[in-house]
Amino acid sequence: MASTAPVIMRIMASSIQTAKRAGGIIRDVLKKGDLGIVDKGKNDPQTEADRSAQRCIIASLTKKFPSVKIIGEEGGSDLNVCDDWLVEDSDEQFLQQSCPAEWRDAKPEDFVIWVDPLDGTAEYTQGYVEHVTVLIGIAIKDAAVGGIIHQPFYQQPDGQLGRTIWGLKGLGTGGFTHSLAPPGEFIITTTRSHSNALHQQALNAFPATKVIKVGGAGFKVLQLLEGKAHAYVFATPGCKKWDTCAPEAVLEAQGGFLTDINGEHYAYNADVEHVNREGVLASVGENHSELVYKIPRKVREAVGV
Ligand SMILES: Nc1ncnc2c1ncn2[C@@H]1O[C@H](COP(=O)(O)O)[C@@H](O)[C@H]1OP(=O)(O)O
Ligand SMILES: [Mg+2]
Ligand SMILES: [Mg+2]
Ligand SMILES: [Mg+2]
C-alpha cells in the first residue's frame, strides 16, 4: 500500500512521523539547557532546537522525496545527519485512508513543502513551551493543501508529551477534537511578541469580548480548531509562508479560512516572496468576509507598505 499510495498521501504520512521526531529533538535541547540562541533580527531568535529540528525534517523528507522542493525557515541545512535523526517510517494509519481525487495525480514537481521546524521560538526561549509547534505545510502549485501541526509539549492524559494534528483538504483532519467557539462571544487570538501600533488599531476595530495573546501561528490556529477563539488577527508583516502553510491547510480542511487581512489567500509556490506582507486573518469560517471589512480600510492600506 505505502509505496503505491499517491505522492500527497506518502508525504503526509512521512511528515507526521518526522514532525514527531523533530518534537523529540526540541524537548531534548530544552532538557540539556543550552539553547544556543542566535538573533536573526529584531524579535527573531533562533536556537539549537530550530537548527537541529530543521536538519532532521529536511534530511528525512529529502531522502524520501528527492525531487520535491522543500523550503525551511532556517535556510540551507547540513543534511548529513545521524541515523537517529533520519526518519524512515510513515504513519500507517494515515495511509489506510483514500486519497481525495483532486490530489491523486499531483506529481512530485507540483509540490512545495514549507517547514517551520519550531514555531514560537520567542516563547520557547521564555518558557511558554506549550505555545511551541512544529509545522510542515504541503502545497500543490499555489495552494496550501496539507499540513501537520505537532505540539512537542502537549501533555496527554496518560502523561506522555506531544500530539500531532493533521489536515488534508478534501479528506479532513485528525489528532484533535474539533469544538465550536462559544456563541454570543467574540474571542480574538493574537500575537504576544510582535505587536505594533497599526496592529493594535486593527484589533481595536473588532468588538472582541476577549483578546488572548499567545505565541506562534500554529498554536493560534489550534485555538480556532479547539473552539477557544473565533478569529486570529495579525495586521502586520512578520509571518512567513512556513508559518501559515500548514495552519492554513489544517484550518481549511476543517471548514475555516486563513487569508491575508484583505481576505485573499497567499500563494505557496516555490517562487513566492517568503514574507506574508499583508498580515494574517483566520477564522472558524462563519463570517470571514465580514471580518475583513471590520478592519478599517486605512489600516489595511497601511499594512505591508
Ligand atoms: N517580526 C517577526 N520576525 C520574525 N518572525 C516573526 C515575526 N512576526 C511573526 N513571526 C513568526 O510568526 C510566528 C507567529 O507570530 P506571533 O507569535 O508574533 O503571532 C512567530 O512565532 C514567528 O515564527 P518563529 O517562531 O517560527 O520564528
Ligand atoms: Mg523564527
Ligand atoms: Mg514560525
Ligand atoms: Mg520557526
Image (spheres, rainbow, N blue to C red):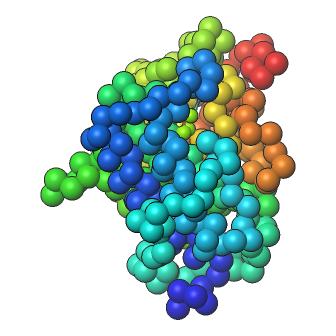
Work out whether 125 lies above or below 90.
above
Looking at the picture, how far across and down is residue 141, in whole percent?
79, 61
Image quadrant assignment for residue 195: top right
Residue at point 29%, 40% (across, down) = 32
Q: Is residue 262 visible?
A: yes
Residue at point 53%, 27% (across, down) = 38
Q: Quadrant of the C terminus?
A: top right
Pick the residue in front: 158 or 80.
Answer: 80
Looking at the picture, how far across and down is residue 19, in whole percent?
46, 58
Looking at the picture, how far across and down is residue 168, in whole percent?
57, 65
Q: Residue furthest top?
A: 197
Residue at point 33%, 46% (across, down) = 27
Q: Is residue 237 shown left or right of residue 96?
A: right
Work out whether 156 lies above or below 86.
above
Q: Is residue 258 visible?
A: no
Work out whether 216 lies above or below 8.
above
Pick the residue in front: 288 or 237.
Answer: 237
Count of marks, rendered view: 0
Image quadrant assignment for residue 4: bottom right
Pick the residue in front: 70 or 81.
Answer: 81
Pick the residue in front: 206 or 4.
Answer: 4
Residue at point 16%, 53% (across, down) = 159
Looking at the picture, how far across and down is residue 254, in whole percent?
52, 56
Question: For ligand 2, which image quadrant applies?
Answer: top right
Q: Is residue 56 shown left or right of residue 151?
A: right
